[in-house]
Image (cartoon, rainbow, N blue to C red):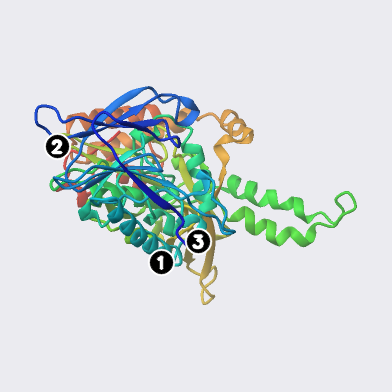
Amino acid sequence: MRPVAVTASALGPGQAWDDRGTSLTAVVAAAASGGAPALVLQRKGGGGGGGGEAPGTVAIPLEPAAAWRAGPQLLLVKAPPGAAAWLLRGGGGASENGAPAPPAAQPPLLALACGSAADADALAAACDAAAAAAASGQRSAKGGSSGGSGGDGSGSGSAGDGGGGGGGGGGGNVFDAKIDKTSSDMYFHYYGMLQHQQNMLQPMGTLLVNERMLETYIYARDKFLKPGGRMFPQIGRIHAAAFSDALLYGEVAGKAGFWQQPAFYGVDVTGLFEAAAEGYFAQVVVDAFDPSVLVSGCATRVFDFATIKESDLTVIDLPLELTVASPATVHGVATWFDVLFNGSAVQRWLSTAPGLPTTHWFQLRCVLAQPLAVLAPNTVLRGSMRLTAHERQSYTVEITLTAPPLAPGGPPQKSSGRYDLKEPFYRQLTNWYYQQQQASPLDAVAVQAAAAAVAAAAAAAPPPPPSQQQQQVGYAQQQGGYAYPAYQQHHQQPQQAFAAQWPQQQYH
C-alpha cells in the first residue's frame, strides 16, 4: 500500500503554488536574459518558532534533471531540455483502515529527479520501497516516516544523489537510525523555539561529546566541506584527573541517607536505600570547582575533527594513569575539555578548565561510591574511562580506578562507577552551592602563595609568545594561580605534542 499518492502538474513561468504545510510559496520565474529558470521561494512571514520568521525571497537556479524541495509536501522537478517542469505534491494517502489519511499523517515526499508524471510515480514507488526496507531495520515505522524541511524549508537534490533529499532532509537519515524518537522530539522541540538556531552550529556539549552533536559536525564535514576547507573547531581534547573533595562526597552520600528511615510517616523506606544510593552516585556532577581539589596530573584524549570518522565517536576509550603527588583520599575523576580554533594567522584555544573563566559547560565530576586512599607520595592510579553512545543523545560513562593496597601484601584497592551524561546533577544551580561559595572566600595568603608559585614556574619555563604571556598573567591575577603544579603546567604552557604544529596556541 502506497503511503503517499504523488500527483503532478505542469508549472509554467510565473505560475505559483502555495504549499499549505509551510509558510512558503513557490514560483517558477521566467528565464532572464537567456539564463536558466529559477525556483523562487517566497516566505510570507509568521512561521517558524514563535512565529518570528520575517518575509523574504530567494531564487534558486534550476539545473536540468534537478529536484528542489519547498516544504514537506511540495517538490518541483526541472526536467531535461525539451520536457516540462513538474510540480509534485503529496496527497491521496490512505490510513491503515483504508480511509484517506489526513495531510498531517502523510509522510513527506522524497526528492525526485524525473521528466514526466509517469516517471515521477515510478521513482516515488522505488523510493517508498527503499524507505520501507530501511524502516524495518534500525528505525521504527513511526520514526522512519519522520522528516521535513530544514532551515527555511528549501534544499536541493540531484539525479546523482540517488533520489535522496537535499536541505529538506526528505526520507530517512542517519540521525533517525541511531536516536530514540522520543528523545529527538523533545530535543528539537526545545531548539525549534530558538529562532536563529538554524543559522549556527555549536557542536560541543558538556564533556565535549554530550548530546552527540559532534556526529552531526562530522556528517556535515563529509557532505559539505570542500577540499582545503577548514573546521572550526579543528581539535578537541577531553582531560581527566583525580580529585579529592570530601564535601562533595558527603553531599552525594547524604542525599541517600533519607532512604535509611525505618518509619517515615509510618512507612519503612530502607528497602529503597541501595537503589537510591546507586542512582545518586550515577549522576555526573556539573559545576565549576576550584582547581585545588585536583590531586593528580591529567590524562588526555585528542580528537582531530578534520580526520575523525563518525563511527569513532560511538565508543571512546581514555586510559587513566594518574600520578597523585601527595597522600590523599581520591573521591573520583574530574573532567573538562578544550577545543582549538586553528586559524590561518592565529590559533586560539577555548578551554573549560577549572580556574579559567567559567563557561556554560562548567566541568564534570564522576564521584566514586568507594573512595580510594593514597598513602604514599607519587602513587600511580591506573584504570580507564569509557564513553559509550546511547540512543538518548548522550553517553554512558564507565570509570575504573585501581590503587595500591592499604597494607603490604593485601589486595589492591579498586573502585568503579557507571554514570549517565543524560542525567546530570547541576550542582552550580543549587542554593547550597552558592551559599558554600559565599561562605568560603579565598584566603588572601593562600592566593598570594599560589600566585608566587605560578610566577616561579613561569620564570623557569621558556617565555611564551608576547600575546600568550600577557594572557597568562591576566589569568593568574584573576584566578590567584593554580594550586597544583602539574595542572598549571598542563594548562598554561603549550604541550610539546602540539607546539610543533600549532606553536601559537592560546587559551582564550
Q: Earlier in the sequence, mark 2 or mark 1?
A: 1
Q: Indicate the amino acid at tag 3.
A: Ser
Drawn side of residue 432 relative to residue 172, left or right: right
- Where is mark 1, residue-wise? 133
- Where is mark 3, residue-wise? 140
- Find the distance from the CA under tag 1 to the CA under tag 3: 11 Å
- Find the distance from the CA under tag 3 to the CA under tag 2: 45 Å
Q: Residue at x 21, y 33 (%)?
A: 38
Label 2 with label 1: CB-CB less than 8 Å: no
Q: Earlier in the sequence, mark 3 or mark 2?
A: 3
Label 1 with label 3: CB-CB less than 8 Å: no
Q: Indicate the amino acid at tag 2.
A: Ser
Drawn side of residue 256 relative to residue 311, left or right: right
Q: Position of residue 315 (x, y in %)?
A: 39, 62
Q: Residue at x 33, y 36 (%)?
A: 454
Q: Which mark is nearer the camera, 2 or 1?
A: 1
Q: For residue 476, say whether it is visible.
A: yes
Circle 3 crowding by C-alpha within 10 Å: few under 14, some 14–19, many from 20: some
- Where is mark 2, residue-wise? 344
Observer-nearest residue: 215 or 21? 21
Q: Position of residue 267 (x, y in %)?
A: 87, 55
Q: Earlier in the sequence, mark 1 or mark 3?
A: 1
In the rendered image, the residue lying farthest to the bottom is 409
